Amino acid sequence: MTTHASGAQPETLTLERIATPVGEVLLVTDADGAVRALDFADYEPRMMRLLGRHAPDAELVAGQAPGSVRGAVEAYFAGDARALGGLTVRTGGTEFQRSVWAALRAIPAGETRSYGQLAAAVGSPKAVRAAGLANGQNPIAVIVPCHRVIGANGTLTGYAGGLERKRWLLAHEGVAV
């Protein structure tokens, strides 16, 4: 482990790999048990890129997430669509991005919102494109449920984890897709 000029140790984050019905997920937690990143293993380079923006000096080590966090992720994929609601998340990002991510977490499991509704929810109804971009920069998939945002006409629009996975997640939560 290296030290910074200030003498402080870099933050250590733990990466755990968890099997799910739609592929292995990569779960990154910090020493406090907050989730710092979650993505599907086939998108590991994307997750690492986003994590590098949000925790640039962190050291990532293989290990186990706290049992309560791992248990919530496992419970979600086993059928409890509301299991992730109580997890603590911690990200970097701009104030606008963090407001969009908080608005995403306010969308109940089993419901969807359009990009326009998401922009309105953060008090910027004309910032539809910016809300969509913030949605796409979310480093914590599923827990910060960017998959619950759909096109204004009800179509499934882009999802960093792939449209088939988005379709599965929404159906898993009880959304007719």
Image (spheres, rainbow, N blue to C red):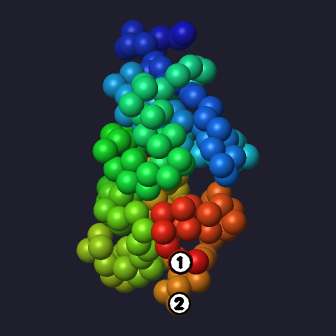
Q: Position of residue 161 (x, y in %)?
A: 65, 57
> Counting other residues with Cα less than 10 Å from the Cα at mark 2, is it few (<14), some (14-19), or many (20 or more)?
few
Residue 16 sits above or below residue 166 on the image: above
**How many numbered marks appear?**
2
Marks 1 and 2 sit apart, C-alpha to C-alpha, by: 14 Å
Task: Report the residue at 56% width, 24% height from top.
Answer: 60
Q: Quadrant of the N terminus?
A: top right
Q: Quadrant of residue 136?
A: bottom right
Q: Earlier in the sequence, mark 1 or mark 2?
A: 2
Which residue occupies the foreground of this view, 28 or 111? 111
Q: Which residue is mark 1?
A: 176
Residue 133 sits above or below residue 45 on the image: below
- Secondary structure, mark 2, is loop
Which residue occupies the foreground of this view, 61 or 87? 87
Outermost residue, right direction? 42
Q: Is residue 140 visible?
A: no
Q: Is residue 72 visible?
A: yes
Residue 46 sits above or below residue 57 on the image: below
Q: Position of residue 109 (x, y in %)?
A: 40, 63
Task: Report the residue at 35% width, 41% height from top.
Answer: 87
Q: Which residue is mark 2?
A: 153
Q: Position of residue 155 (x, y in %)?
A: 59, 83
Q: Nearer the viewer, mark 1 or mark 2?
A: 1
Identity of the amino acid at label 2?
Asn
Task: Report the residue at 48% width, 63% height from top.
Answer: 173
Q: Quadrant of the C terminus?
A: bottom right
Q: Is residue 85 left or right of residue 35?
A: left
Q: Quadrant of residue 66?
A: top left
Q: Is residue 148 left or right of residue 167?
A: left
Identity of the amino acid at label 1?
Ala
Q: Position of residue 40 (x, y in %)?
A: 64, 46
